[in-house]
Amino acid sequence: MMVSLRWLGLLSIWLSAAYVSAEDLQPVEANIAVDKAWVGQRIPFRVVLRAKGSFEGAPSFSMPQIPQTVIVKIGSPTVSSEQHDDETWFAQSHTFAIFSQAAGTLTIPAFPVRFSHHEGFTGPVQDEEHQVPEVTVVVEDPPGRPSDQFIVSTNQLEIAETWKPQPGKFKQGDIVARTITQTAKNMTGMALAPPMENAPSSVSLYPSSPSVHDKTDRGDLVGQRIDTLKYRFDQPGTVIIPESTYTWWDPDKKQFGKKTLPAATFEVEAVQQTTTAGSPASENGWRWMALLLLLLGTVGILFWQREWLFDRYRKLHAVVYPPHKVAAKKLLRACQRNDLVEAEHAWAEWQNLQEASFTPSSDLAAAVHELHAARYGNGSSSDWSGEALSRAFRLQLTEGKQKRRQHENALPPMNV
């Protein structure tokens, strides 16, 4: 990590906090501890809340949605007290980690935070709402990195795979499962690379949603991503699943690391069709032969035009079942069932189908942040309720429809 002298500046600020007057004291402060970072590297982001009394409950951050960027809450907040002009202030420090795949100047815009505190130690509870200040950091591309390559920046990345069953002899129609596990330091599982989905045309590939886990120990973050790919052998013969290469950038050594998962070979045996002896040919036998030839001809034409037919089918399916509406229904069903994992996957799927200029409402952004906090925070994920997310998401959809109608009605009348 390219750590700058800003650490010394932050240290001096912390040491001199007692000498800051109450008039100059800010209720919310934010800082990034580095001036520069690599693409895909953990960027430490710290937010400090202050109040004239002990804090009550957990604060709510309406985290901004930034393209190609993930912001993750790390660990639990730390609470301390400060003296300013003979007044005692309580300070609550929150640690986040930022991961970005976009090179250039990364701006975290100001965003709302809501928290509650007592007046003094035991006084009535007072609600506060403030803006977390905007912060910026420069994100640099590792030298020689292709612009479209997903990169992970870490000094330790472990990759392992298992096959069930092991590669060997199989029959046509059999299915084999491949599990790839990635574990990295100073990373969140959400920022690890997806697997390569490459397979020969004689194999049907069925990827599943990744399983993501994060662990923190005294500020140290370890992220894990587990992907399961299932392959079905549709045709007999020798089938080779190509090798997969994972590349990452080591910020300490300033060089690329690489690991290749070897190709796997399968011998697929054709399934013999069971036949029964029929009666001697009769005068109607030619009809059955003609029907068989017609059937074979039809199958041949369908096979010959399979790409065109599949393309037409996909276009028709996209018209009848628009992907963004399908993803929206998945999200609402997951919220209704309070299914935290499915809701997270459905939200990511729906968000990826929106335009780059899409910005969620403050209520929806807050609900999504609560979803991520319940998924990856230290609390119990079983306590999460999808009611707030469902309500905010339905309102977002309604507002989107109204904006489209207003745009259509804004067209000038035609001259007659």
Image: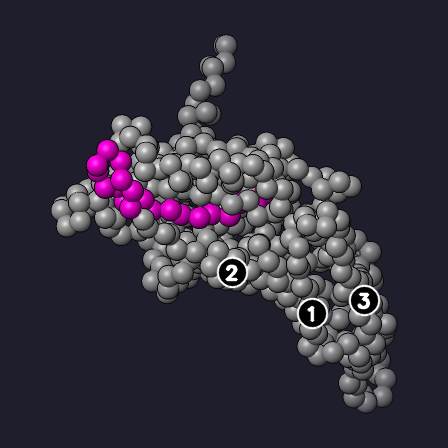
Q: Is residue 329 visible?
A: no
Q: What residue is shown at x 56% (from left), y 59% (from top)?
A: 223
**Residue 407, image x, y percentages:** 46, 25
Residue 356: x, y in percent?
56, 35
Main SS category, magenta section: strand
Q: Amino acid at mark 3?
A: Ala
State whether residue 252 is above or below residue 262. above
Q: Nearer the viewer, mark 3 or mark 1?
A: 1
Which numbered tag is attached to residue 263? 3
Q: Mark 2 highlights which residue?
A: 214
Please tell me how crowded label 1 is: few (under 14), some (14-19), or many (20+) other residues with Cα within 10 Å.
Answer: some
Q: Is 25 left or right of 327, judged from the image as shown?
A: left
Label 3 or label 2, whichever comes before in sequence order: 2
How many numbered marks have been drawn onto this rendered protein structure? 3
Residue occupying image coordinates x 85% and y 73%: 237
In the figure, is residue 273 to the left or right of 318?
A: right
Name the residue type under label 1. Glu
Image vertical order of residue 202 relative to residue 407, above or below: below
Secondary structure, mark 1, is: strand
- Would you say 349 lies left or right of 21 here? right
Alpha carbons under labels 3 and 1: distance apart: 12 Å
Residue beneath the point at 33% across and 46% down:
92
Boundaries of the magenta span: 81-101
Image location (x, y in percent) of residue 347: 48, 50
- Residue 89 on the magenta span: yes
Q: Which residue is mark 1?
A: 161
Tell me if label 3 and label 2 are in contact, CB under 8 Å: no
Q: Is residue 202 left or right of residue 158?
A: right
Mark 3, secondary structure of its residue: loop
Q: Alpha carbon of mark 3 to alpha carbon of mark 2: how far?
A: 29 Å
Of the numbered discs 3 and 1, the one sitting upstream in the chain is 1
Contact flag, marks 3 and 1 (Cβ < 8 Å): no
